């Protein structure tokens, strides 16, 4: 990362990064709402990847005709699997690779791989199609479990995202579905009336998961859009309502709710934001009603007082949201003060080192030799100068102060 002189930065550099995080899920949306821009008639995608299946399968499940002899073995030839996505379909290659050309965009797209009574699925969300590499897709038992949960929730008019379904506290629910599918793959054909995914042993854990998993990403998306508008309209009361009263930063013991609100108030009074560029790197839901949003961003602004333009460093942070009652609020680790860390993973040690740097700067400015001595190790030395010692450094400082 390119470093810049901190003296060039406006004192709101940390806080303005918040505007970046606020708008992360409205990227690519129309008028700030939750819909993507209208679909172009020629918007289509080439889907490619592999079917991944290492579990044994009852061979009679793979055929449409009656077999006299059947066995349970690992599939080695995938060339008869029919891949389908929307109106497009085609067969996989023997090595399990596949490719479907010109698949039209769909907000409810499901990719399926079918052979006999064996079916595997993968849900392709709009964000997958438009923002990820869809030439390396993997369709397997795990993707099938997730797709079944999404499909069941959709039938109940609940929209679950991949982040909702993949939250850590729900991993046991997905595991139970995957285990049921693995067992279903070993059943004889006579015990599978339709497909393995229509069996009660599979549907039961799917229903449980769909009825348990909360649609939290949509709620947080709304919260971010509201906060973005509050920031642009300088609505301090609404803005403050989304900050937890327990707010703090791991790297700065002085960070708290009131300090945060004071800094926002300063920004509202003295600055116009010109550009807020950003990229969302990760979004993860955590146990105990928490969510982690990792975003990176940079801000350009103009001071109302001086008219001068300035640009921040690139900030990256894992911002923790927490559900308090029925409301999601920002709980921890949002950079908003000048000098807050630009990198992920900063902790209390960062704050201690930053504090020591600040004390050193003050000691040098005031020519305070005792304070300077306290900040220098008795074992001080320099790799490039064998004569550099703590005593030599202190004597040099004393002479310069006196001069």
Image (cartoon, helix red, strand yellow):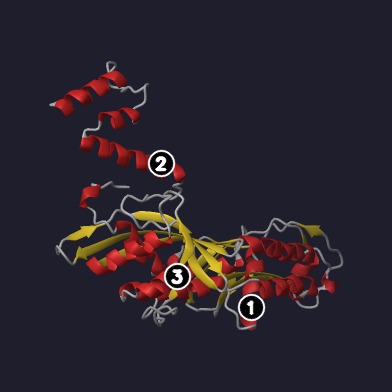
- Residue 68 location, quadrant: bottom right
Q: Nearer the viewer, residue 274 or 196?
A: 274
Sequence-first tag of 3 and 2: 3
Q: Is residue 250 above or below residue 121?
A: above
Does residue 46 appear anywhere in the picture?
no
Does dot 1 land on a helix, a strand or a loop? helix
Q: Position of residue 297 (x, y in %)?
A: 35, 59
**5 above or below 376?**
below
Residue where numbered disc 3 is placed: 242
Residue 341 location (% of width, % of height): 37, 49
Specify whether 137 is left or right of 259: right
Mark yes or no: residue 169 visible. Answer: yes
Residue located beneath label 1 in the image = 153
Choose top left, top right, bottom left or bottom right for residue 237: bottom left
> Label 2: which residue?
352
The numbered dot on residue 328 is none
Of the two numbered discs 3 and 1 on the same chain, state the one appearing first in sequence.
1
Tell me the element at label 3.
loop
**Mark 1 or mark 2, which is nearer to you?**
2
Q: Are marks 1 and 2 in contact (CB under 8 Å)?
A: no
């Amino acid at each position: 990362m390119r470093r810049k002189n901190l003296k060039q930065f406006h004192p709101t550099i940390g806080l303005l990064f918040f505007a970046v995080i606020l708008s992360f899920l409205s990227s690519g949306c129309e008028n700030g709402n939750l819909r993507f821009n209208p679909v172009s008639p020629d918007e289509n995608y080439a889907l490619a990847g592999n079917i991944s299946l290492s579990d044994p399968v009852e061979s009679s499940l793979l055929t449409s005709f009656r077999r006299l002899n059947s066995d349970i073995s690992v599939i080695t030839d995938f060339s008869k699997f029919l891949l389908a996505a929307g109106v497009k379909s085609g067969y996989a290659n023997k090595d399990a690779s596949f490719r479907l050309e010109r698949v039209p965009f769909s907000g409810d797209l499901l990719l399926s791989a079918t052979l006999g009574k064996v079916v595997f699925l993968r849900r392709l969300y709009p964000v997958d199609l438009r923002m990820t590499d869809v030439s390396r897709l993997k369709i397997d038992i795990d993707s099938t479990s997730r797709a079944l949960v999404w499909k069941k929730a959709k039938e109940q008019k609940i929209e679950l995202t991949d982040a909702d379904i993949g939250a850590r506290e729900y991993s046991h629910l997905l595991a139970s579905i995957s285990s049921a599918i693995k067992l279903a793959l070993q059943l004889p054909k006579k015990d599978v009336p339709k497909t393995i995914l229509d069996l009660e042993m599979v549907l039961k854990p799917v229903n449980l998961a769909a009825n348990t998993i909360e649609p939290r990403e949509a709620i947080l998306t709304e919260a971010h859009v509201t906060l973005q508008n509050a920031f642009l309209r300088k609505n301090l009361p609404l803005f403050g309502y989304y900050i937890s009263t327990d707010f703090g930063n791991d790297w700065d013991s002085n960070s708290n709710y009131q300090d945060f609100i004071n800094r926002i108030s300063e920004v509202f009074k003295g600055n116009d934001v010109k550009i807020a560029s950003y990229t969302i790197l990760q979004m993860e839901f955590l146990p105990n009603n928490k969510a982690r949003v990792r975003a990176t961003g940079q801000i350009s602004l103009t001071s109302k007082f001086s008219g001068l333009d300035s640009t921040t460093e690139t900030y990256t942070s894992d911002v923790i949201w927490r559900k308090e009652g029925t409301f999601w609020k920002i709980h921890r680790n949002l950079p908003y003060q000048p000098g807050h860390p630009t990198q992920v993973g900063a902790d209390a040690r960062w704050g201690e080192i930053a504090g020591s740097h600040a004390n050193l700067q003050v000691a040098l400015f005031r020519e305070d030799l005792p304070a300077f001595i306290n900040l220098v190790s008795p074992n001080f030395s320099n790799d490039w100068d064998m004569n550099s010692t703590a005593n030599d450094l202190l004597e040099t400082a004393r002479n310069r102060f006196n001069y």
